[in-house]
Image (cartoon, grey):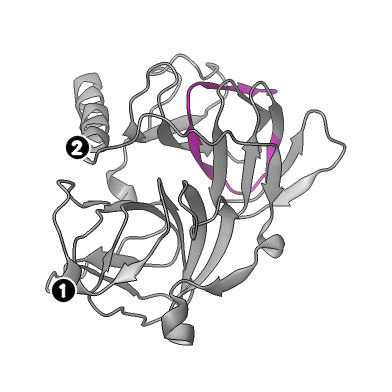
Amino acid sequence: MMKKIIMVVLLFLEIGVNAQTPTTDHTKSKNEVVTTDQINWGWLNPLRGNKSPAAGQLWGDRTDTLASGFLVKFKKGFSSPPHIHNVTYRGIVIKGLLHNDDENAEKQWLPAGSFWVQPAGEAHITAADAEENLAYIEIEEGPYLVKPTEEAFDNGERPVNVDENHLVWLNSNDINWVANDSKVETAFLWGEHKDNQLRASLIKLPAGFEGNITNLSANFRAVVIKGTMAHQMKSSKFINLLEAGSYFGAKKDVTHTITVKDDEEAILYIRSNGDFEINSKQ
């Protein structure tokens, strides 16, 4: 079983390398929190107006040249015309069912918690099939543009679609930065877990979890993919209620106190330029 786990983890790391994953994010993160009621929504593709999905910025600016992360909200039955993007993007399904593939491909509906990568220049469609459909999207450089398929090109990257049922979750028996009794699990997504290398994982916190997450790198960004949690920075008196779609960032050596609701586990997408620590109070 351990050999199988190691092989799948290596596969995810190899996917990151083949997809030309950047090794660092030069924009340092800051102490910030964006709750779902603070998100400003607009159109993902302003040229299509309300025929376009809605987009809400979490960090960075997708119209600028640097990395950024944002939410995209799709209506039930939405299906885009074939198109390309000028930049590669990664996506995590937060709510609903999403399909992202070649226009002639059979629908592969990705449920909440699934992960995909769409290479720059590759023609594709995006569709949604639930009453509520929400995804987190991030890019390593901007601006994020939609272009016609006539401008398609091959940049050497290949698309990735990983259903949440195919993720491999590791616990304290497999990794050494999680306390033995915390019941925290992680699924590696992309990047290399080396010093100061940009990487991302999904972190599963059990229902009722109480503990701390300490950022040890120059860049730390977290998006709530599932569940509800109370969040407080060590130096702040404010407690925020973070639901799916919320975001928080941190400076180096800043600690966050996290309390998860008693009746539902929570999942965080964490992107960092290095290590972070998770400690349970339980």
Q: Residue at x 17, y 65 (%)?
A: 152
Badge 1 amino acid: Glu
Residue 198 position in % (x across, y down): 41, 30
Which of the 4 quarters of the picture holds residue 176? top left
Q: Residue most toward the right?
A: 237
Residue 172 falls in image quadrant: top left
Q: Position of residue 194 (x, y in %)?
A: 38, 18
Relative to 115, say whether 2 is above or below: above
Residue assigned mark 2: 18
Q: What x and y, as percent, mark residue 70?
A: 51, 57
In this orientation, does residue 136 appear? yes
Secondary element type, mark 2: helix
* Magenta-drawn segment: 258-282
Q: Would you say residue 157 sits in the magenta stretch?
A: no
| Residue 122 against residue 129 in the figure, above or below | above
Instruction: Give the mark, 1 or 2, whose residue is nearer the N terminus.
Output: 2
Which amino acid type is shown beneath numbered disc 2? Asn
Q: Secondary structure at mark 1?
A: helix
- Of the 4 image quadrants, the one containing the N terminus is top left
* Percent position of residue 96, x then y: 43, 67
